[in-house]
Image: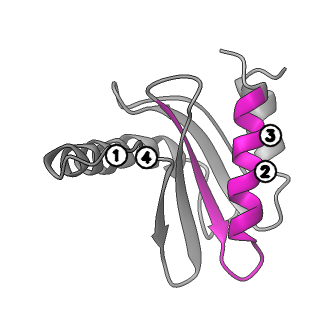
Amino acid sequence: MGNVRETLKSALTLEGALGVALGDWKTGMCLGYAGTDNSAFPVANLELAVAGNTQVIRAKLRVAQALKLDAGIEDILITLTNQYHLIRMTQAIEGLFFYLALDREKGNLALARYKLVQLEKSLVI
């Protein structure tokens, strides 16, 4: 079992990981973050990214409700020209999400999704 800091450090071991954070979409608060200090995605931006992507999650939940979709959100992918930004909702702890910025050339999106699922299982709050 890992606490937030250990879990986020483990996520950074992914090839191409630029930064990762754990956020609460209900409050917009960042519970923790870790980054590589890469100029492509400064660590200081992670708290802002959590707050901003809280609005993305809320909007998607409103749309899903309006469409009467009978399924929960697992993740949301934002594809930039040089990065993937993956928002992964935690299934075990309601209201929390991982935010991962991944270099498109170096990273493996499928592996990143798998790793976040595994990390959630060991997350202790």
Q: Which residue is mark 4?
A: 73
Badge 3 vs badge 2, beta-carbon distance below 8 Å? yes
Q: In front of the other: label 1 or label 2? A: 1
* CA gap, disc 3 and disc 1: 24 Å
Q: Which residue is mark 1?
A: 57
* CA gap, disc 4 and disc 2: 23 Å
Task: Work out whether mark 3 precedes mark 1 in sequence or the reverse, and give the earlier one.
Answer: 3
Residue 69 appears anywhere in the view: yes
Task: Work out whether mark 4 precedes mark 1 in sequence or the reverse, and give the earlier one.
Answer: 1
Query: Which of the numbered marks, if any, corresponds to residue 12?
Result: 2
In the image, residue 110 lies in the stretch drawn in magenta: yes
Task: Work out whether mark 4 precedes mark 2 in sequence or the reverse, and give the earlier one.
Answer: 2
Residue 50: x and y in percent read 45, 42
Residue at horizontal 78%, vertical 77%? 106
Amino acid type of the residue tagged 2 in the rendering: Leu
Is 49 drawn above or below residue 47 in the view shown? below
Magenta span:
96-121
Query: SS class of the residue under badge 4?
Result: loop
Query: SS class of the residue under badge 3?
Result: helix
Amino acid type of the residue tagged 4 in the rendering: Ile
Residue 116: x and y in percent read 70, 46
Badge 4 vs badge 1, beta-carbon distance below 8 Å? yes
Q: Which residue is mark 3?
A: 9
